[in-house]
Amino acid sequence: MDSQTPAEGSPALHMARQGTQVLEPCIEFRDAAVTRGSKVIWSRGTFRIERGTVTAIVGSNGAGKTTMIDVELGLIPLSTGTLTVLGQPAGAANRRIGFVPQNYMDDLDSNVTVEQSVLLGLTGTRFGFHRVTREQREAVHDAIEFVELAGKERMRLNELSGGLRQRAAIAQALVSRPELLLLDEPLANLDLASQSAIVELFAKLNRDWGTTIQIVSHDLNMLLPILTGAVYLLDGHPHYSPMAAVLDSDLLTHLYGTRVEVVTTPQGDMFVTPNPKVEPRDHVRSTLDADEAAGFFTKHYGESHGTAGAGTAADNGDDTKEDLR
Amino acid sequence: MNLTFNADWWSLLTSSFMSNALVAGTLIAVAAGMVGYFTITRHSAFAAHALAHIGLPGATGAVLLGLPVSWGMGLFALGGALVIGALGKKASQREIATGTVLAFATGLGLFFARMSSSATKQMQAILFGSILTISSSELLGFAVFDVLLLAIMSFAYRPLLFSSLNEQVAQAKGVPTHAMGILYMALMAGVITVATPAVGTLLVFALVVTPSATAIMLTRSPLSAMVVSALLCLASIWGGLVLAAMFPVPPSFAIVTLSTTLWLVVRLVSGRSQH
């Protein structure tokens, strides 16, 4: 874009600026690192998430997936680097972000109903005495309708099943019509039918409302049909990659520390199936050999991003791995 | 034991010291109803219970210094509330630390009580309450607290509710959740200070927290839970006073029995488990 910058003050510049506003990424990390105490959670995160996309954040336990959401919300500061969310520094645009934490609404010792809980998504931040306006009631109604909980407005949250409670949580996040929706393990502890229903809801949200969605998940299977790409936390660094590159057996196998296969069906649908027959013997779950991880990093990112991050282990990475395909 | 029925209970109930007790019950019920709901949604029932015990050395210490019991009680409970609140919501769930401090505070209360004979005499009243001896000046203090509580609640109601129910999201949306935690604990200290003269530090839980737990099982909104909770608390106190006028039982016992019975019946009937 720099090469085409028009003269200062010209109408063309104004147009270009408007243009960049439309095209500006939803989330942009530049050389970002997070530390807790003296421990580096992850570092050298440089990637961007475009608007209107559906992205998964994947990685093994303890890789810093939830930390990434906290960083995007400005709840945890970066130790180095910069992060822009919806065109503003992290934390400044939180009113335009919907957030559904992990196990949200699961241990509620209260009597609030679906409707009251969703309404708090609009009014919960306001001090002082305010009447609930008709617009607010309509927004609550629309959000409940969107997540298909219509008719259950007067049900208490603790009377709903896990899947319906998750819908109520999503409705609370959606009631303020956020541009970006962040969800932490939204499919955990749900049965398969509820999982696929929630995934369909994400697809509808992305399609009908144009909401950018980012989902922390330890399990990609259910999300695959709707994902634009994934941020994966590997060897201590977050990397973004579009779907085709993530769907690589070797990469997923090493990401999760267990053998994962990728199958492409004639319809073009792709499934990732853990196959016990090809499970490597004495593998340790959630443990990634640093050399191997670095090798994979180089294999997928070395060409387009240089060898930054691969370190000294980069050299022996490629040839030690056999290609499954 | 001789549980003889007092046929003249109505004249006992309409005497002047009894009218003070009935007014005190109303003021306590209003305060407990408003704050008890948040105790349950915040999972901080044990911290609330501990505040009463942290107030005990303040109460006996005040007697030692010749000051009103409520002053010492309120000061110590508020101090404990601010410390627990400042440590954060998770800290109020740290049961071991809270329980240890509770035990130490109770011991300290005993130590202060034994340092003077007047404090020893008042120890029983502080531990188990003496609703029939509440003075008019105490009532005035209760009323001032209720008005203050109502004003704070109507100002901070929604952010306090949001941060009590959904702390993580409320924090992300800009609600000062830490300040809300401290505010809640401070209000709880006030309610306990007001309720302790009625039933004492040992039984105050049944008056402040139990009616809210019962109300939550019966209602479908925070506001209706608060109203029902206040009514249940009121019914327990007034009913307890009637029973104490009819039969030779301590009012505190009758009040706590009613509150517990209401909770047990509702819990068995609704079949829902509340922890």
Image: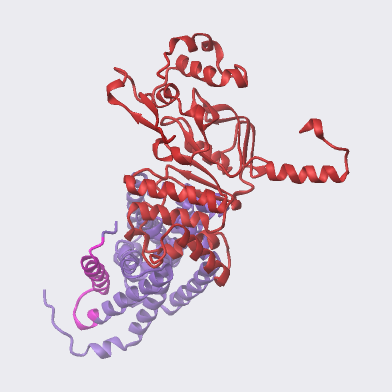
- A293 and B16: which is toward the camera: A293
Number of residue marks:
0
Q: Which chain is red?
A: A
Q: Quadrant of the N terminus of chain A?
A: top right
Q: Is residue B6 magenta?
A: no
Magenta segment includes B267: yes
Q: Is residue B60 left or right of residue B273?
A: right
Does B12 sit above or below residue A238?
A: below
Residue A111 locus on image (x, y percent): 37, 64
Colour chosen for chain B: purple
Report which quarter residue A19 is drawn in.
top right
User: Which residues fall within the magenta stretch?
Assistant: B243-272
Is residue A44 visible in the rendered image? The answer is: yes
Among all residues in the image, which is located at the extreme front? A266
The location of residue A69, given as percent across then percent down, is 52, 40
Q: Position of residue B203 (x, y in %)?
A: 29, 64
Task: Point out the residue furthest to the left here.
Answer: B1
